[in-house]
Image (tube, helix red, strand yellow):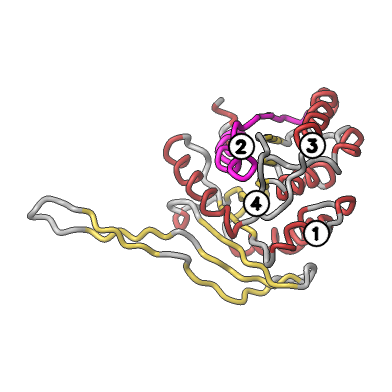
Amino acid sequence: MNKLIIIVTFCLTCISTHILQAQDVKAKNIAIETGQIITIKSTILGEERNLYISLPPGYDTINTKLPVIYVLDAEYRFGIAQSIQTYFNITTKIPPAILVGIANPTKEARSRDYLPQSYGGQAEKFSKFLSTELFQYIQKNYKANETRYLVGHSHGGVFAVYTLLNEPNLFEGYIAIDPSLKHIFKEGSNLLNRDLNGKRLYLASSDVAYGYLEDVASDMQADFAIFKNHLYQTRGMNKLAFKIDHINDDHGNSYIQGFSRGLRYLMNWRFE
């Protein structure tokens, strides 16, 4: 069994905020811990990867194990995800969860790790890294249970759908925001025939327009529509629970609304 080695751990930020009180009351210092960056070494990937970790309020006093939300492209999406999750802890009353962001070592690694072999990637290897190395590390070092959620945008959204189709038991819920499904929908009709009872998928499209760190295909919306039809056609057979949205924004900015809506759908559905 491959083992993960911690290379370095440090606090991202610890901010002291002064709150103005009445004249006869001294100001208070409140520490706001935003998270940690942990560098691990993966035998499967043959490289080091940075993880961004955020723990829910009261984590130290929690006696039960918590679900884990895994966020792809952590180097520029983790902050957004963390802010939304923190806000929902107050307004939407989602269950407490550990937030784990997986950062990319290079721009090229996104295509390599997130896209299936038919798209020139090595998603199968990245999936193995998650299942045999990362999950075990998180459960060993944090109060994590086996309930997991995956969040991906664009290429990351492709990986989320790929994982649902090929390794559905790795996660309970999937958020796929504006993925290019050109190389997935052809086999989707067969893979969606399996039992997906208990799994939840939030799938969102956008107005495309432009991408970030990747090429955005002009036919994304047509491919999205084809895969969406597969979902509806197989719903009665596979028992997959899903919600499909269209975000009236461009591809690059669809993440904010997509993560917000998707997180509520996956974690607050019992209160809908």
Give the foreground label among 1 and 3: 3
Q: Which residue is mark 4?
A: 212
- Residue 192 seen in the figure: yes
Q: Which residue is mark 1?
A: 128
Residue situated furthest left in the rendering = 24
- Bin the neighbour count of mark 2 within 10 Å (Cα to Cα): few under 14, some 14-19, many 20 and up: many
**Amino acid at pointer 4:** Tyr
Sequence order check: which comes first, mark 4 or mark 3? Answer: 4
**Amino acid at pointer 2:** Gly
Label 1 secondary element: helix
State the CA–CA distance, disc 2 to disc 1: 25 Å
Please indicate whether residue 31 sits to the left or right of residue 69 in the image.
left
Give the foreground label among 4 and 1: 4
- Bin the neighbour count of mark 3 within 10 Å (Cα to Cα): few under 14, some 14-19, many 20 and up: few
Q: Which residue is mark 3?
A: 219
Q: Quadrant of residue 32?
A: bottom left
Q: Quadrant of the C terminus?
A: top right
Q: Which residue is mark 2?
A: 262
134 w.r.t. 229: above or below: below
Looking at the rendering, the stretch of residues picked out in magenta corresponds to 239-266
State the CA–CA distance, disc 3 to disc 2: 24 Å
Please indicate whether residue 98 sits to the left or right of residue 117 in the image.
left
State the CA–CA distance, disc 4 to disc 2: 21 Å
Residue 264 on the magenta segment: yes
Question: Going 83% across and 58% down the picture, which residue do you hit?
Answer: 122
